[in-house]
Image (tube, coloured by chain):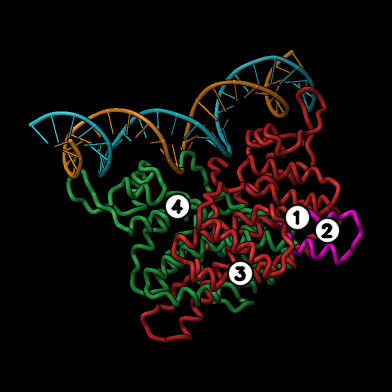
Chain colours: A red, B green, C cyan, D orange
Amino acid sequence: MRIAELSRYTGMPVPTIKYYLREGLVPPGERTSPNQAQYSEEHVRRLKLVRALIDVGGLSVAAAKTVLANVDTPDRGILHSLGKAQYSITVPREHVEDEAWAASRRDVDELIGRHGWQVRPRNPARGTLAEVIATLRRLGQEDYVAAVLDDYAATAERLAETEVREILRRPDVDSMAEAVVIWTLLGDALLAALRRLAQEAAAERLTSTDQADGHVTGAAATASSGPAPASRRRRRSG
Amino acid sequence: MRIAELSRYTGMPVPTIKYYLREGLVPPGERTSPNQAQYSEEHVRRLKLVRALIDVGGLSVAAAKTVLANVDTPDRGILHSLGKAQYSITVPREHVEDEAWAASRRDVDELIGRHGWQVRPRNPARGTLAEVIATLRRLGQEDYVAAVLDDYAATAERLAETEVREILRRPDVDSMAEAVVIWTLLGDALLAALRRLAQEAAAERLTSTDQADGHVTGAAATASSGPAPASRRRRRSG
DNA sequence: AGGTAGTGGGCAGCGCGACTATCCAAGGAA
DNA sequence: TTCCTTGGATAGTCGCGCTGCCCACTACCT
């Protein structure tokens, strides 16, 4: 198919596809002449993936490019390439590295040890987690962090087990790598939305059983919506 | 204190504080003369909150403004105001509303029913969830969605229960509202980071027990880092 | 009283990211 | 042949999040 068809199948404007081609997010078509190229189903797939990473996953175009490049080059060692794909998703936050951060960083290490996790010291999620915890501390949520952190960790552990099992069931390394990227990113969004729904339900349930006094109108709830994580969304003309 | 001190305490440049004041993210100081104002500890707190919402939570300045405005006006009905705070976090995605979306939307409703959740029909998280599921479908992950969705939902339910309990323990409505915002947003980031750590651990564990053949180097893993959700982060001069 | 640094207020500008529009020449399809 | 499409490139647009600059004024030091 040619670029116009590609545009029709994916619903994306031709200039945008050209832009992604230029940026290397999508491989070039197979040239049939100096100014003519053929695209395949693969390109349709890829474009959908790009859109998902950017719109739902909230990645920048540059980050998406890096991630996809890693997906495309599965080197020796399944886990190594999968890990690489994952690491590339991180835009490593710049640390403030103050006192609070260092303390949080220590807590993270303890947490990991406490749960018996085998995690490489250089996994950037350690730093990210430390930053989030430090932020919560600065906001005066220290006690609550302590109260729920291990609960969160146990939850994450359960989820991760399921996810990893599912991913290891994929037929080949390529689809594993792709699945890692998709599920890491969209899994965040999925979980976020579910959490908001569950929160509303929980708020409803807990307040109506705890005390049935009328000042609480059963209508509203603690839940919300939307993966706060600011995805870039624009799409003007479509 | 005056604006320079405010800047020193929070580590943010004076022009940025002015900008937030102008945008209404932070209430104006108490004027002592036509060009002089006093700021309080409250302002320090508030600025830290703003920074957390924007940097860690990934909200845009405009979104943060809306959220904070809702936190500031706790109307009658605890749950109502909390719900409002939560709903405002959503930047309701523009739907594509095609066939796949409609199907996913139906799945969401079924899921909610299946788990016995009491969720208002207009909760925007329904639509968000539907969109994520539709995206996963379009990416050919349909089978896997079915395999893990209820697992995710049960997980979210457990988490939500803990969170709501913690929030209801707060002394007053104001701190409840603030906690809702903080924990909804930072909870996403917290969970995302933990999930990545747990994934690396799970990948390590599952591959080394399942099969001990050497082509898998124990070093790398499925885990990654960083809350993919593109937080805006810049901070040039500090 | 005079000088200097700091303040509030406001608007303009900047740098970046992600497109989007336009142009062009070389091919192709009818 | 005639018109259309394509690839390729360059320039323009738009929104966002600051950042700078200017002004009038004030607080405080000397």
In this rendering, the count of numbered labels is 4
Q: Nearer the viewer, residue B22 or B84?
A: B22
Disc 3 marks a residue whose amino acid type is Tyr
Image point (41%, 67%), residue name: B177
Specify the quadrant of the image occupied by residue B15.
top left
Kindly identify which residue carries mark 3.
Answer: A152
Q: Which is in the foreground here, disc 3 or disc 1?
A: 3
Q: What is the CA distance from the residue labelled 1 to the residue labelled 4? A: 33 Å
Is the C terminus of chain A in the top left, top right, bottom left or bottom right quadrant?
top right
Please say whether residue A180 is one of the residues in the magenta stretch.
no
First in sequence: mark 3 vs mark 1: 3
Kindly identify which residue carries mark 4.
Answer: B51
**Picture coordinates of residue B7 (x, y %)?**
36, 47
Chain containing mark 1: A
The disc placed on residue A170 is: 2
Q: What is the CA distance from the residue labelled 2 to the residue labelled 1? A: 8 Å
**Picture coordinates of residue D23 (x, y %)?**
22, 30
Image point (63%, 57%), residue name: A126
What span is colored magenta in the figure?
B200-224
First in sequence: mark 2 vs mark 3: 3
Is the N terminus of chain A in the top left, top right, bottom left or bottom right quadrant?
top right
Mark 2, secondary structure of its residue: loop
Q: What is the CA distance from the residue labelled 3 to the residue labelled 1? A: 23 Å
**Picture coordinates of residue C13 (x, y %)?**
40, 28
Q: What is the CA distance from the residue labelled 4 to the residue labelled 2? A: 41 Å
Disc 4 marks a residue whose amino acid type is Arg
Kindly identify which residue carries mark 1.
Answer: A179
- Dots 4 and 2 on the same chain: no
**Picture coordinates of residue B52 (x, y %)?**
47, 55
Disc 1 marks a residue whose amino acid type is Ala
Please say whether residue B222 is one of the residues in the magenta stretch.
yes
